[in-house]
Amino acid sequence: MKKLLISAGAVTALALSTPAFALNPNQANATATVNIVSPLSLTKNSDMNFGTIVGPFASDTDYELQTDGTLASCATTCAGTPSAATFTVTGTANQAVKFTYQSSVNLAGPSGNLSVDLTTDHDADPTLDGSGSATYALGGTLTVLSGTTDGLYTGNFDVTVDYQ
């Protein structure tokens, strides 16, 4: 009887010390990743140039410079060689990039400032090709105000590019 009680006590102690088995463990699996890319390099190929626009200007007039360098809305006489601002970006092949720039630029000249809206005509953000290169063109809409005087009007703007 003594052996039976000792055996029963040992079985009870063993049962109390054994953890209960969960039917569904609370466990999840996650993956860690990283995409290593080369630094981007941005080079300006050409400046934005609306060419020569002949006045006089009786009312405010808009001139749209398209990404292919065409001055699309020249209601008066236009001359010279207009060109969109173009850039080349290089980095890691097949990666998407995003160009950023201000929405407008002021061109200072003899009768004050003229404004170019940079949001009106631009290429879509590119993906770098298999060699890690892409080009980007930026045009815009120049508003020439009534009474604008003759002269050269210029202004600068910054363009940046980052991986998406």
Image (spheres, rainbow, N blue to C red):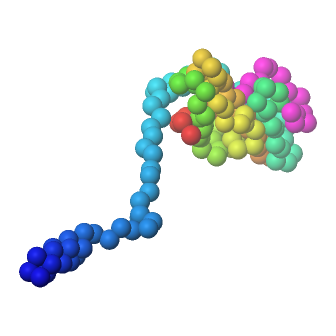
Residue 112 in the figure: left or right of residue 66: left
Residue at point 58%, 31% (across, down): 95
Q: Quadrant of the N terminus?
A: bottom left
Residue furthest to the top in view is: 131
Q: Residue at x 53, y 25 (%)?
A: 92
Q: Nearer the viewer, residue 42 or 10?
A: 10
- Seen at 71% across and 36% down, the residue is 124
- In the foreground, 83 or 45: 45
Picture quadrant of residue 128: top right
- The answer to whether any part of residue 113 appears in the image is no
Q: Position of residue 162 (x, y in %)?
A: 53, 36
Span highlighted in magenta in the image: 72-87
Question: Where is the C terminus found, in terms of image quarters?
Answer: top right
Which corner quadrant of the image does residue 71 belong to? top right
Is residue 16 at least partly visible in the picture? yes
Q: Is residue 46 left or right of residue 62?
A: left
Residue 8 forms part of the magenta stretch? no
Classify residue 28 as left or right of residue 90: left
Q: Of residues 29 and 43, which is closer to you in this image? A: 29
Rendered location of residue 13, percent (x, y)? 17, 75
Above-or-below relation of 128 to 4: above
Residue 85 in the image, given as x and y percentages of width and height:
67, 27
Q: Nearer the viewer, residue 17 or 90?
A: 17
